[in-house]
Structure formats: C-alpha cells, structure tokens
Image (spheres, helix red, strand yellow):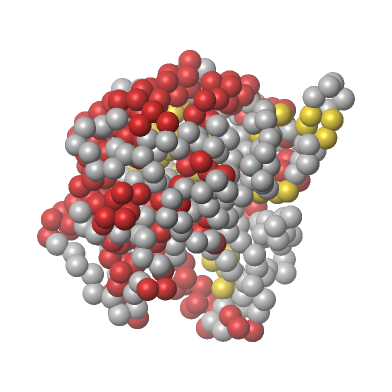
Amino acid sequence: MAFPKGFLWGGALAANQCEGAYLEDGKGLSQQDVMPQGVRGPVTNQPTPDNLKLIGTDFYHRYREDIALMAEMGFKVFRFSIAWSRIYPRDEVEPNEAGLAFYDRVIDECLKYGIEPLITLSHYEIPLHLCRTYDGFRSREMIGFFLRYAETVLRRYHDRVKYWLTFNEINVTLISPLLGAGVMTPKDQLSAQDRFQTAHHQLVASARVTALAKQLCPAIQIGCMAASAPRYPMTCDPQDMIAMMTSQQELDYFIHVHCTGEYPYYAKRLWWENNVCLEITEEDRQALKHTVDFISFSYYSSKVVAADESRYAMANGNIMRGLKNPYVPVSDYDYPIDPEGLRYILNYLYDHFHKPLFVAENGLGSKEELTPDGNGGFTVKDQARIEFHRGHIQAMARAIDDGVEVFGYTSWGPIDCVSAASAEMTKRYGFVYVDRNQDGSGTLQRWKKQSFDWIAKIYRSNGADLD
Ligand code: BG6
C-alpha cells in the first residue's frame, strides 16, 4: 500500500470557527455571529457575549503560530475558508482591503513553509446583511453577490492558490438552510420547494464561479464539497434497500450536478415526492454545464437507514443522524466510528462520478482535559484520536489499492476550534489543544496533544509509517 507521491496531507479549518476578530478591520457580521448555540439554538438580534465564535480561537491574530505548528506536523496543504463578511461586510461594490490583506498574509505564511493553501469560498458563513435582506440563497439575487465576492478573491489570490472549493457541505442546505445558505426564515416555516430552490441557487452560483475560475486561470483546480455519510440499509429487507438507495440519492444529487452539469434522472421523483417545481431558467441550465475538476467531501461516519425507522434507536451525530449501528463502536459523543465506511464511500464516489477525490474533513470530536506533560507544560492524552486517524488512513490506503484516485486528506480542526453544529468549545478535534473553555475563559495558549507527534510521523512519511 502506497500513497501517491505528492499526496496532499493536512488539516482544515473554517473562518467562523477559528478566526474570531468578528468586527476587526472592517469585518461585517455574518449569520454565525447571531447563532450562539449553532444550529441547535436560537438566532439572536445582535451578537451576544456567550457566542464563542466572536473570539473563536483567535486565529486572526495567531495564524503565524498556528501555521508554524501545521508545518511542524508536516502539512502539505491547509484548507481554510475566507470569511465573506471580511471581504464584503454588507453589499458593497468595493471590497474591504484590510480583509483581503489578511488572507494575503495567511497565504504567504503557508507558502513560506511549502504548504499549499486550499480555499473554501463559503464555509457556513454569509454576510448577515445579505441573510437578512434576501433571506440568504433563498433569493436568486444572492448568485450575483456570491459571484462578485468570488471574483474578487479569485483575482487576488489565483497566482498563489491552485485549489478552491465553492460551498462547504452544500447538501446541508436541505437540512439546515440557515447554516448552509444563510436563510433566516425558520426551517419549520420553509417548504421543500423553498429548500430545493435555495439549493438550486447555490448550485448555479457554484457552477458560475467554476466557470469564472477556469476563465481567469485554467490551472486552477476547483471542486465541490459534500457531507458524505454513506448510507447502509438496516437489514437486507428489500424495503430497507430501497430506503438506503433513495437516501443515498439525496446526497448524490448535489455531486451529480457538479460533476455532470445536469440534474440526475431521479431528481424528477425527488421533486415530485416533495411537491417541488423548481424554477430553472435556460441561463441556469447553461451555467450548470460548468463542471468541477474534483470531488471533495467530509467523512465522519456512515449512516444507517430503514424503511420504518420508528422500529430502531437513533444514533447520535452532528447534523445528519442515522440509526444505531450495532457493528461499530461510538465516540465520547456517542457518534458512530466506522473507518471502513471511508473505503466504501471513496469507491462509491469514484465508481459513480470518475473524478479525483479529496477527503476534505475527517476527525474525532471528543471531550478532553489538559494534563501536565512532565516538562513544565501541558498535553492531552488522546490515544483514541490516534486510533481514529490510523483506522481511517488505513481505509483510505485500501481504497487507493482498490484503484480509487485520491489526492489529499485534511483532518478536521487540526488546531481545536469552536464546533459548528453546537458552537461549543468542549468538543475538540485537534492535534493541538487551545486553552479556551466553554465559559469563554482561557489563555488561548496552544499545547501539543499526544497525537501531534504521531500525525507528524504519518504525514512526513507520506502515510508509510502507520504504527
Ligand atoms: C462538518 C463541518 O460538518 O463537521 C465543520 O464542515 C464542522 O464546519 C465539522 O466543524 C464537525 O462538526 P462539529 O459540529 O462537531 O464542529
């Protein structure tokens, strides 16, 4: 088993979960600044002090230290997102130069260490003014705002940044329109028509940005990004198989449009069942034809489904939950841990879409405590994280042996950050601990966890030394 030469090992972070500095240097508010408890809590009128994202883990001021730690871990790539609200705080015509200059510094710092920057244009973060005025991507006008923002940053950074993603986990829009698309209307007041139309606007926006990126710089590699929990049927009951198939199609729907330039055949059934009649203009159809170069996805675990789910217990999970799988262990948070699911989804996506794959997120969220490291400092004993990544990297290696084309792996939250679904600091994914507590206290100092040296060994040996 061998990872290809030049395989991109690294980690991924999102602006709203790590940067903080929520009003510094001209940044505007985003929907995240009024979601103190993530998707599980209320939206507030103004930012409130209990919102941990306002300070985050202070990446805005500590990016040099953080990128140096990434270099020490042997990163070849750093996936981060640009905060749209730093570049266009509201609906301006001219961008905010201080915001652009910040990402110049971040990119240059990466390049200094030979780390390839990979930019997500929109990672669960949209200027609040646009969310409030247009109800986010529920309105078609958002396509124009997104294009303006994307063009600005593509023009500014394209000579230094080869890899780009449009929307983080674009399929989450159907599940959480606020998180994924900045829709302020509460989900229970939205029809399926609203949610699918919102997703359509994002798919068109994604395709138009793809076209623009290629026109600006043909060397750019641009990908889509989807939350990819592969579906398993609870039993071999044919009805469970059909439930599995249709659930999987809801995920594939997004990747299919990005890869083939049109909606899949089963979209008609999906729309019909949900009473949806999409408004798709001829211009939209032409725009969608601009397909991506690669597929990126997050993988945390598989998801079990059944025709009659009321007969089974639910598993825990972040935004997408399935049924309890008796064959796999669970994390501190009771989330299923299933490395084989990564081999499966890699094969599945390659088989269906024939595009190079990039594992954009994978990681273990756990509750952790600092303990003395014996040298006057502190550490975290996170053997469970080592086992988690070992299992998943081995599964990815098997998929490569199966013949799947995978060109990179970025672990989620390599330096602890605020969680997305519940906006908490307690759940941590990093190889580096950040001293910030749930009540907001803490020095923000960084401490290497036990997993730090282990992952550095894996990354530096191009995945050869997995012991
Ligand atoms: C992914 C998101 O869904 O999962 C990240 O792209 C998020 O933004 C990650 O942080 C882990 O989820 P959570 O809610 O535990 O932070």
Q: Residue at x 19, y 67 (%)?
A: 279
Q: Residue at x 23, y 70 (%)?
A: 278
- Please determine whether, in this image, residue 463 is positioned above or below residue 51: above
Q: Quadrant of the C terminus?
A: top right
Q: Is residue 21 left or right of residue 442?
A: left
Residue 429 appearing in the image:
no
| Front in this rendered view, residue 36 or 420 | 36
Q: Quadrant of residue 425?
A: top right
Q: Nearer the viewer, residue 342 or 431?
A: 431
Residue at 64% x, 42% y is 440
Q: Is residue 457 above or below residue 44?
A: above
Q: Image quarter for residue 450?
A: top right
Q: Is residue 205 visible?
A: yes
Residue 234: image location, x then y, percent? 62, 75
| Residue 214 drawn at (x, y percent) | 24, 36
Outermost residue toward the right in this view: 374
- Residue 178 position (above or below residue 90): below
